[in-house]
Image (cartoon, rainbow, N blue to C red):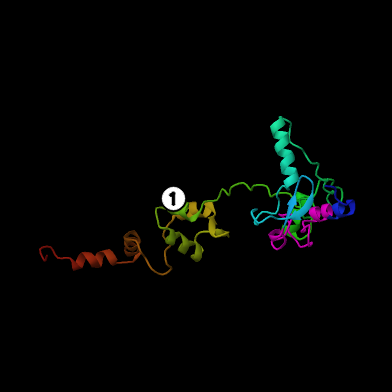
């Protein structure tokens, strides 16, 4: 059965645009829409629409017609290769300097269509990927806590008080190793005006005039 060339050209154009061959609705993954495939079917061999029989599955839009099915049966019985129908060539991508075929219902190729869906512009020039940054040599709070033998909260308190110098990088902290070494040498800070060591108090007593004599006079042997 021959098909009018004008009708065949319209069907091929709709097929390239991803529309229904019968009514022209947007159907990118099928030859017919849901409403048309209930009564019609599309034969991919002879490229024509025919009335669907009640026995055929209405969920499928593509079915071989009876004539093409009979020819395939005769070819198979005679041992001949199956008939191959040449599909129309897909148009080139609409992006400049791109000759790749379009992807089904899109106006662009696969690469430019992905850029259109993600960035809204198929001709956008993507930036090069970021190079991997070298790891930061400065220790973290957990590493400093293990080095000093304290808890992580103590290290955070030292950073807040200014005894350790650190920089917030992302969600964590990076601490200056020099400040950690200074704190490891002198972990306790003396408050001004208050003596914490017994050695300091002895030195003060020795420097006071008459302190040793007064203490020796107060001591009487056998009084204890």
Q: Secondary structure at mark 1?
A: helix
Which residue is the extreme one toward the bottom?
A: 193
Residue for point 72% across, 61% down = 36
> Which residue is more in the foreground, 117 or 28?
28
Asked whether, in this view, residue 30 is left or right of residue 141, the answer is right
Q: Is residue 124 visible?
A: no
Chief secondary structure of the magenta span?
A: loop
Does residue 119 lie above or below 130 as drawn?
below
* Residue 192 image point, x, y percent: 43, 68
Which residue is the extreme one toward the left?
A: 222
* Residue 113 image point, x, y percent: 76, 54
Magenta-highlighted residues:
11-39
Is disc 1 surrounded by few (<14), some (14 to 19) or many (20+) residues within 10 Å? Answer: few
> Where is mark 1, residue-wise?
147
* Residue 51 image point, x, y percent: 74, 56
Q: Quadrant of residue 86?
A: top right
> Which residue is more in the foreground, 46 or 176?
46
| Residue 18 is one of the magenta-drawn residues | yes
- Quadrant showing the C terminus: bottom left
């Amino acid at each position: 059965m021959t098909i009018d060339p004008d009708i065949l050209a319209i069907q091929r154009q709709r097929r390239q645009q991803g529309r229904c061959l019968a009514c022209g609705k947007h159907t990118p993954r099928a030859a017919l829409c849901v409403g048309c495939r209930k009564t019609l079917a599309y034969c991919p061999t002879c490229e024509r629409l025919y009335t669907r029989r009640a026995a055929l599955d209405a969920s499928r839009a593509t079915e071989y017609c009876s004539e093409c099915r009979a020819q395939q049966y005769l070819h198979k019985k005679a041992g001949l290769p199956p008939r191959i129908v040449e599909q129309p060539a897909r148009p080139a991508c609409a992006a400049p300097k791109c000759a790749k075929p379009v992807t089904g219902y899109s106006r662009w190729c696969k690469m430019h269509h992905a850029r259109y869906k993600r960035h809204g512009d198929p001709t956008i020039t993507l930036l090069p990927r970021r190079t991997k940054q070298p790891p930061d040599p400065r220790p973290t709070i957990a590493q400093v806590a293990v080095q000093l033998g304290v808890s992580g909260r103590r290290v955070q308190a030292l950073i807040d008080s200014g005894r350790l110098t650190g920089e917030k990088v992302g969600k964590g902290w990076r601490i200056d190793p020099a400040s950690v070494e200074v704190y490891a040498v002198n972990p306790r800070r003396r408050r001004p005006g208050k003596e914490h060591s017994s050695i300091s108090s002895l030195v003060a007593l020795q420097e006071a005039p008459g302190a040793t004599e007064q203490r020796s006079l107060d001591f009487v042997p056998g009084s204890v």
